[in-house]
Image (cartoon, coloured by chain):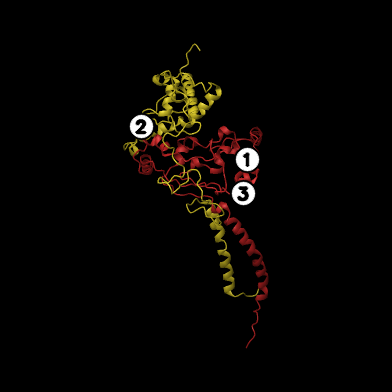
Chain colours: A yellow, B red
């Protein structure tokens, strides 16, 4: 049989014990809840060093970029102008109908083209090139909104690559369109390397053939 | 002057003192280990970005490939935040008057960068290489979580050294075929059997090491 403890001691212990539960619960909540008030650095170690990493800010420059934009006329390594075929899709003043000599028409090239097409083009043109990509569909919905186009959206349906005009375009012209864009389509010259753009153009030709195969073949 | 006498209940108090005295250091130790761990202090970081870009919409609903915007990820250590031009590939037309996109349009006109806030920052002494991981079958989802379901991106993993080593010591639970690296909705351990993943480890000669200089240079 326990002797009678003073009330203050008993309650103090109970309250103290209950309070001791608060920190673990608070930590558990922190671990489970996204918050802008993190990360919390207790020891800085060398987490923040006086150096500039990729895409970091640098207040010394007026535009705040540590990475400097390419100066006019500068050519990056590996991006020198090769020839009219490779860089412009033109052979003797006409659109090229083949891949440039530096590349080979092979399964590997077409598979690379397919992969890149699915990344960069399928959003609007759709995986099979019928102009039925998810971005295109959403844009059409935004335009067709009952109360008027949402936020002033304007959209011309993405082109089916199997249309008569597009289907008959030479590979060099497709390459040119990918590079510089056309009408409402932006150019992808800065976003996709040259050889990948050629691979995409070759794959588009293959896609077009798949929907327009001559019956004799 | 009367002498102080311990009250009778103080004898019965002794065992309680011993128990509390034994638990208290344990409590403090566990609390520090739990509460000051990177998962609590650094996980779930969710800054408010200058533009309310939704990965859930773009990468999730519209199904755009991660590489459409983060197009350096396969070739460079740094997975670039895209230039404003990439946003404007579509947003010259879609939502072109949206107030949410005001900063994007300003950036497009002035050439000044949008000041996105870095969510996944490791210490400046750690050199993570994206290309080395994604080209050998470590999916984005292993470190970044289901970004395709995040309205606002937050840190899904603590990005601590212990966490990095967890995978370097047990890569088999974190590799998948390289062609599925960007398919965030596929769960690594349930989509591919352990044998398949062991096969990948052999095929790509994946032996992540634990030398200091692997990450710290």
Question: x%, y% of residue B89?
Answer: 40, 34
Residue assigned mark 1: B173
Distance from Cα at disc 3 to Cα at disc 2: 49 Å
Q: Position of residue A53 (x, y in %)?
A: 51, 45
Q: Quadrant of the N terminus of chain A?
A: bottom right
Residue B122 tag number: none
**Element class at badge 1:** helix
Residues at marks 1 and 3, CA–CA distance in whole angstroms? 16 Å
Res A22 → quadrant: bottom right
Is residue A144 visible in the rendered structure shown here? no
First in sequence: mark 1 vs mark 3: 3
Output the chain of dot 2.
Answer: A
- Kindly identify which residue carries mark 3: B162
Question: Marks 2 and 1: in contact by CB < 8 Å?
Answer: no
Q: Estimate how packed mark 1 is, as few (under 14), some (14 to 19) or many (20 or more) residues with alpha carbons within 10 Å.
A: some
User: Height in image: B68 above or below A44?
Assistant: above
Q: Measuring 49% from the left and 23% from the top, which residue is drawn there?
A: A203
| Nearer to the camera, B122 or B188 | B122
**Chain at tag 3:** B
Within 10 angstroms of label 3, few (less than 14), some, or many (20 or more) residues?
few
SS label for mark 2: loop
Considering every residue shown, the one lying at the far top of the view is A216
The disc at residue A155 is 2
């Amino acid at each position: 049989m326990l002797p009678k403890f003073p009330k203050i001691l008993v309650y103090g212990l109970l309250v103290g014990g209950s309070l001791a539960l608060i920190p673990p619960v608070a930590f558990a909540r922190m671990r489970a809840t996204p918050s802008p008030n993190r990360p919390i650095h207790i020891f800085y170690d060398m987490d923040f060093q006086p150096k500039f990493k990729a895409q970091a800010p640098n207040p010394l420059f007026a535009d705040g970029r540590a990475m400097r934009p390419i100066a006019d006329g500068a050519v990056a390594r590996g991006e020198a102008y090769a020839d009219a075929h490779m860089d412009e899709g033109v052979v003797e003043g006409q659109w090229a109908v083949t891949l440039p000599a530096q590349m080979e028409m092979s399964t590997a090239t077409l598979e690379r083209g397919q992969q890149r097409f699915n990344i960069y083009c399928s959003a609007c043109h759709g995986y099979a090139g019928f102009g039925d990509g998810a971005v295109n569909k959403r844009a059409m919905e935004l335009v067709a909104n009952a109360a008027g186009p949402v936020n002033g959206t304007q959209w011309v349906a993405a082109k089916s690559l199997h249309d008569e005009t597009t289907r008959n375009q030479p590979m060099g012209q497709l390459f040119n369109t990918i590079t510089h864009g056309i009408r409402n389509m932006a150019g992808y010259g800065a976003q996709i390397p040259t050889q990948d753009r050629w691979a995409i153009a070759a794959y588009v030709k293959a896609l077009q053939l798949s929907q327009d195969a001559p019956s004799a073949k | 002057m009367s002498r102080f006498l311990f009250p009778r209940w103080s004898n019965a108090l002794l065992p309680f003192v011993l128990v509390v005295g034994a638990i208290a250091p344990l409590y403090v130790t566990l609390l520090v280990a739990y509460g000051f761990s990177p998962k609590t202090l650094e996980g779930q970081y969710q800054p408010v970005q200058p533009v309310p870009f939704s990965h859930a919409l773009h990468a999730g609903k519209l199904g755009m490939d991660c590489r459409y915007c983060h197009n350096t990820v396969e070739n460079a250590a740094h997975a670039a935040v895209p230039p404003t031009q990439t946003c404007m590939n579509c947003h010259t037309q879609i939502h072109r008057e949206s107030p949410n996109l005001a900063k994007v349009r300003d950036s497009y006109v002035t050439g000044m960068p949008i000041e996105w806030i870095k969510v996944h920052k490791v210490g400046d002494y750690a050199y993570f290489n994206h290309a080395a991981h994604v080209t050998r079958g470590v999916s984005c989802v292993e470190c970044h979580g289901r970004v395709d379901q995040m309205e606002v991106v937050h840190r899904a993993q603590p990005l601590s050294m212990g966490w990095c080593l967890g995978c370097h010591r047990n890569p088999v639970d974190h590799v998948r075929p390289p062609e599925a690296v960007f398919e965030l909705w596929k769960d690594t351990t349930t989509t591919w059997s352990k044998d398949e993943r062991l096969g990948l480890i052999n095929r790509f000669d994946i032996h992540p090491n634990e030398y200091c200089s692997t990450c710290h240079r």
